[in-house]
Amino acid sequence: MDTFTKLQLPVVEDRLHGPNPAVSLNATYYEGQRVVYGRHSNSTWEALETLIGELEGGTGVSFASGQAAMFASSLLASSRLVISEDTYVGSRDLADFLNQRALIPCTYVSEASLHHPSGLTTLQEGDVLMIESPSNPLLVAYDIAALAEACHAQGALLAVDNTVATPILQSPLRLGADIVVHSATKFISGHSDVLAGLVIVADEELAERLFEIRAVVGSIIGPVEAYLCFRGAKTLGVRVRHASASAQWLANALVERLGREAVCYPGFDEKLVGEGRQQSAGGALLSLILDTADRADRFVTQLGVFHHATSLGGVESLAERRSKYSGEERLPAGLVRLSIGLEATEDLWADIDQALRAAGVDDPAS
């Protein structure tokens, strides 16, 4: 007969297990299993979701990208999405997109308002307030516990983008937040080879809504990408602590070179950042502000160890002038964001030092 012979699978489960989840490439499943179709779940996703759920203290849901994770989180708002002005440009692009197409009402809240949560009286029941702490790229930390209290007093939910701090340095759900979002493209995968997003919630009803959103919209992560995120997360603690220590040293050296007002780094916030505080260390991201866009461009192009590229959170150090991008006009023209990788700190400083000199920024100590 010109037909395929039906594959006879073993009845008894294969009990061989190792440290890595299998990469499940099934798009469909046989009748009688708990999942019917690959858009609804996948065992490799589930391994990643379990891991990130344990790290953040909630239920994890994976998505195709950080932007997809942000979109899904915005759909948890039954009233409005309220978003910080001081946040990643992609988040603001999403808010504008939703507004312009009348999908979800969106409004903005200022940095000053976030520093005084008791004054957030315009929140409404059903709102989702979405913030970053630290923000990107100005790297401002906000009091998550105080903001959560202010949100809950008015029937709103607090969503925190924890991409920059990572669950190694900060636990927003344990501070009272309702929703945590990650661009897993960054530190969690950690090797600049994956696009992925994660949302973690403490409430199971919110988790079920997120699973439904993912299945209906189809913004699913690929199984290979899920595996790479799982593998990257195994070294998350080692990578983040090493890069954070380097960033703290470099930030201090840049303050001596450029002055305190020219360096943005969360580690300088003694109220919210440090051992035993909201965020246990400053993290791997810092920004320096040079006097002109031209000088900043010359600085970036002279770097040799740092790669001139966007993104952050990989093992390699990256540098870029953020205000050159559309939508980032709010930033100082000479702001350069540095994502600190795993290279030797002294090599990174030597590279920064020579690039500053080449850009015409003399060392005052010389």
Image: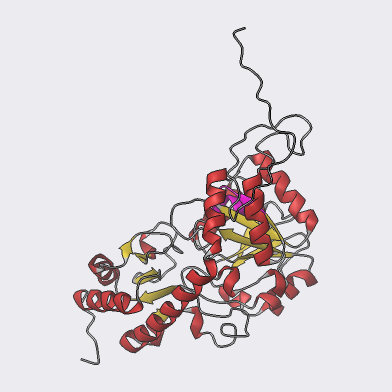
Q: Residue sitting at 63 percent across and 40 percent down?
A: 218
Tell me where residue 125 appears, x and y as whole percent. Answer: 78, 62
Q: Quadrant of the N terminus?
A: top right
| Foreground pick, 325 / 239 | 239
Q: Is residue 89 above or below residue 356?
A: above
Residue 64 colored in magenta in the image: yes
Q: Is residue 83 above or below residue 279?
A: above
Q: Quadrant of the C terminus?
A: bottom left
Tell me where residue 87 appears, x and y as whole percent. Answer: 53, 65
- Residue 38 visible, this angle: yes
Tell me where residue 326 appears, x and y as whole percent. Answer: 41, 56
Q: Is residue 364 above or below residue 114?
A: below
Residue 41 colored in magenta in the image: no
Question: Which residues are drawn in magenta?
Answer: 61-70
| Foreground pick, 322 / 329 | 322
Left/right placement of residue 311 relative to residue 304 reads right
Left/right placement of residue 261 relative to residue 136 reads left
Q: Residue furthest bottom?
A: 365
Q: Residue sitting at 30 percent across and 69 percent down?
A: 293
| Foreground pick, 153 / 254 | 254
Tell me where residue 26 appears, x and y as whole percent. Answer: 62, 35
Q: Residue furthest top?
A: 1
- Residue 81 visible, this angle: no
